[in-house]
Amino acid sequence: MTLASGFFALLVGLPLGIFLFITGKGQFYETPKTHKALSGIVNIGRSFPFAILIIALIPFTRVIVGTSLGTTASIVPLAIAAAPYIARVVEASFLGIDRGLIEAATVIGTPPFEIVRKVLLPEALPALILQYTVTLVNLVGYTAMAGLVGGGGLGAVAVQYGYQRFNGVIMFWTVILLILLVQALQWTGNRLANSLLTKRGLS
Amino acid sequence: MSPFIECKGVSKRYTRPKERDVDALRHINFSVEKGEIFGIIGLSGAGKSTLLRCLATLEKPSFGQILFDGQDLALVNGQELRKVRSEIGMIFQSFNLFSSRTVEENILYPLEIAKVPLEERKRRVAHLLPLVGLNEQKNAYPAQLSGGQKQRVGVARALANNPKLLLCDEATSALDPKTTGEILKLISDLQKELGYTVILITHEMEVIKQICHKVAVLDQGEVVETGPLSEVFFAPQHPATKKMVQKSLHEIPPNLLSGKGKVVHLHFKGEKADRPIITQMAKQFDVDANILLGWIDGMQTATIGNLIVELTGEKIEEALSFLRGKNIHVEEVPLG
């Protein structure tokens, strides 16, 4: 569930983040109005308490998935919650790239879309991986919350069996599993990012 | 024949909200012939970077024209602009190499953008790597290279598409003197072989002296002096130029000065033997000439001898006129 919603969040968040960046101050598609609008949307998305978001999105979820309960259904609100976060993170990673590189690419004659594809994404890749890992870890936490309101997954198990039926053992083990999941995600992310950095001679 | 690059009345104004407008460039006029190495020198803030950015099509001038082989750069857009940009190569003070690409891949980058066929790309890179002396490092990443090596990659990348114009933005300012010399020599040698035109900006006189044919001096957004090195160095006119060309007085140990006479900076063209003239002057006008400093600027297009002399005596002005009559440029060096 985490991975699926992570995937969709990336699908929405990445382009959003790219647009956020290129419409920003000093960038090649600088359009203050669009940037402000996108920024506003992202900010609203991020400040929505997740529990409320799930409930508010129930009708929308029903339209897309057919139901508002269960693992598949919770992917919708999870992806929508994570997308703005990813957008911000993508924007920040791109802002961390030396402007000189973008200028060099421009003087070489790179068209704007190619700059995103050939310069921004590869240069920011280690940072993007690390940030995305953080997002996924956060998502694990959110999936547990989704479990509270009818979503499936480990969170639901922890809540239904562990909390509601006071089965301490199950609660204990689901928590352990969640911790392991987070560790695995973090470890993978770090490994990927570090191997890239080492290869590039940057660490 | 019209010049290769021409700047006509180029001005650049930055408007800031709530602040005064900044005129970074004012009425810049100069031209560069094909195959020339043209230097632009000025202190920080003089407008050099702005000018170069306009030449590189990163910015458009507010007024005036920049003609690139007859084309007005301000009017070029889209596909045309891409084509023009493929004819311009640029190297930077902080190198601006792609850290995610190896040396070889960095050099390949412009070729990919220009959609050069694969075989041709490989050929060009294979040709360029030994030219810049980086054959051994072709699979290394920029972070693993020294500053000099990084700039060599920069040069190779800039030359990948066989540009007509090479722009150098303080390209050696971040390098030590020895490496600076190597990079400048590389640019100059390759220029003889590949025939491109060079426009470089710097705040270091030594860079101009080493490879430039002509120079323009920028001061507060204006070109205050321009011409071949042999003239600008020999007889600097504008105060800003003089400041840069002359060694300043506080480089001379104070205990060498008697404090009674005039200190002058003499420029000799070519390899004239200066001794006889000085002694002649000393005898003829009964003037004591205390030589404080002497050096020779051997540059691309001229050799200029420099002497800083303290003259004491009654007939100093006549002595100076005498020297001027011998085609020696005389400049008084203010004390203190």
Image: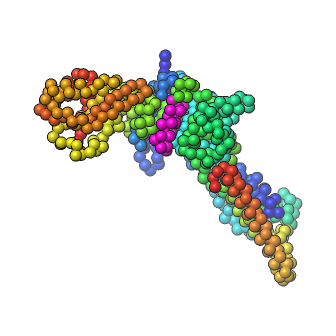
| Location of residue A183 (image quadrant) | bottom right
Locate residue A139 relative to residue A170 in the image: left or right: left
| Residue in front for this viewpoint, A158 or A146 | A158
Q: Which residues are magenta?
A: B165-188
The picture places residue A87, in percent across and down from the top left corner, at: 68, 55
The picture places residue B299, in percent across and down from the top left corner, at: 41, 29
Could one spot residue A34 in this view of the protein?
no
The residue depicted at 51 percent of the width and 36 percent of the height is: B182
Q: How many marks?
A: 0
Residue B184 is covered by the magenta coloring: yes
Residue B231 is covered by the magenta coloring: no
The picture places residue B293, in percent across and down from the top left corner, at: 28, 37
The residue depicted at 19 percent of the width and 36 percent of the height is: B262
| Residue in front for this viewpoint, B322 or A134 | B322
| Location of residue B21 (image quadrant) | top left
The residue depicted at 62 percent of the width and 45 percent of the height is: B142
The residue depicted at 47 percent of the width and 40 percent of the height is: B178
Q: Quadrant of the C terminus of chain B?
A: top left
Q: How is the image coloured?
A: rainbow
Could one spot residue A191 in this view of the protein?
yes
A96 in relation to A118, above or below: below
| Residue in front for this viewpoint, A179 or B15 | A179
The picture places residue B232, in percent across and down from the top left corner, at: 35, 28
Residue furthest to the top = B1
| Location of residue B105 (image quadrant) | top right
Residue furthest to the right = A66
Locate residue B87 relative to residue B265 in the image: left or right: right
